[in-house]
Image: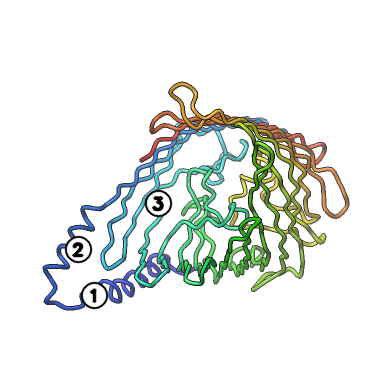
Amino acid sequence: MRSPILFLGRFAAVTSIAILAPESFAEEAAEKSELQKAIEAIQPIFVARVRYEGVDQEGLSETADALTYRLRAGFETGAISDTKFLIEFDHVEALIDDFNSTINGNTGFPVVADPDVTELNRIQLTNTSLPDTKLTFGRQRIILDDSRFVGNVGWRQNEQTFDGVRVQNTSLGNLALDVSYVQQINRIFGDDSPIGRWDGDNFIINANHPSPIGKVTGFAYLLDIENAGGIFSSQTIGARLNGAQKLADGKLSYVASLAQQNDYGDSPFDYSANYVLAEGTYSQNGISAGLGYELLGGDAQRGFQSSLATLHKFQGWADKFLVTPTGGIEDLYVKAGYAPGAVGPFQGTKFVAVYHDYSADQNGGDYGSEVNLLATTKWESLGFTLKYADYDSDGFATDTNKVWIQVDFGF
């Protein structure tokens, strides 16, 4: 396994020499002034989260009760020679640990994937000295589009980060290019887990351009992941359109996406699978209603996988389809929302309800259904979330109920 510390150290050293070296020792006084300005411009990072998660899963004699907290702290400096430095640590700990964290040995309980960890979450150098270009070196957060293919899994207490080099460029008119080389993926399970790190040579390519009907995005995600015999390696190439138009007294928002996935690198599979997404939402006066269809295909050997995604956002919050079945999955869903905004002292209040109907892509088998409910609001620096998921297996997987109560604080 490659050492992430060695990797980051090399990048930090090379970047520091190339970017931070003074143009002239005679300008020492001016450089000290620049350093002083960078120190004075330091932005602290502090985020705290406390969450209760309860899980009742058919087939397990115990129900999960997880009360966990996360402290995230760090800072980002001001710029020196157009370069900023950021460092950030995470600490996650259970106050009530009646759950299977994946590493605590409580295998009789349902899984709540929030293990105790104390880790370096991010350490990066960001440089903007090239015109219309942002370079990021080191351990960083990468979130692309709606996180369907690349995300930080921000719902979990220990987020997913990436060790690599990222280039974001807007020099070609309205075309935005975003290209990353990722050597290591730091997963939510933490350093103590055998599946906590993925290594390999991974290229993440995303480009978008505005159009009269919305933002058009093309992407190619080339993942050659060494772990687990290469089963998570894949090549995904596709396109996406998302936009909104005025309709009557409201707004129609829409998104559509198509992608093709094949085996890649050291993958032991020989497969091809399709991805399709079509969704429309109409909103007016804080009330919204939407209809969507998402297909992750399969060819009986391997289903379409999105291994770097924030999977909790998709196919229901009960997390029953984190790994796509070999026969693929179709998700037909309807959703409704109400966002009154300010309610007394509370801001950003919203309510959401979603119903999912799942079926197999290959044989039309029934994968069950799910109801999701959400209420969120904010008061000054505090955020409050109440969330519920009820999955009815209808013979596939196991019936599962989940409830979350969460409080966030940050600045």
- Give percent across and percent down for residue 8: 38, 67
Which residue position is annotated with label 2?
34
Mark 2 falls on what kind of element?
helix
Callout 1 touching callout 3 (CB < 8 Å): no
- Give percent across and percent down for residue 408: 44, 35
Task: Determine whether, in the image, residue 155 is placed left or right of residue 275.
Answer: left
- Give percent across and percent down for residue 317: 64, 39
- Give percent across and percent down for residue 183: 50, 68
Crowding at label 1, few (<14), some or many (≥20) Cα neighbours within 10 Å?
A: few
Which residue position is annotated with label 3?
119
Residue 11 vs 139, above or below: the answer is below
Taking the spot 44% from the left edge, 37% from the top edge, the residue there is 49
Does residue 388 appear in this view? no
Mark 3 falls on what kind of element?
strand
Disc on the earlier residue, 2 or 1? 1
Crowding at label 2, few (<14), some or many (≥20) Cα neighbours within 10 Å?
A: some
Callout 2 touching callout 1 (CB < 8 Å): no
Which residue position is annotated with label 1?
21
Pick the front one: 32 or 229:
32
Report, in whole angstroms, how far the alpha carbon at label 2 lies from the one at label 1: 13 Å
Residue 126 vs 90, above or below: the answer is below
Disc on the earlier residue, 3 or 2? 2
Give the mark toward the camera: 3 or 2: 2
Mark 1 falls on what kind of element?
loop
Disc on the earlier residue, 1 or 3? 1
Does residue 323 appear in this view? yes
Task: Determine whether, in the image, residue 357 is placed left or right of residue 235.
Answer: right
Report, in whole angstroms, how far the alpha carbon at label 3 lies from the one at label 2: 31 Å
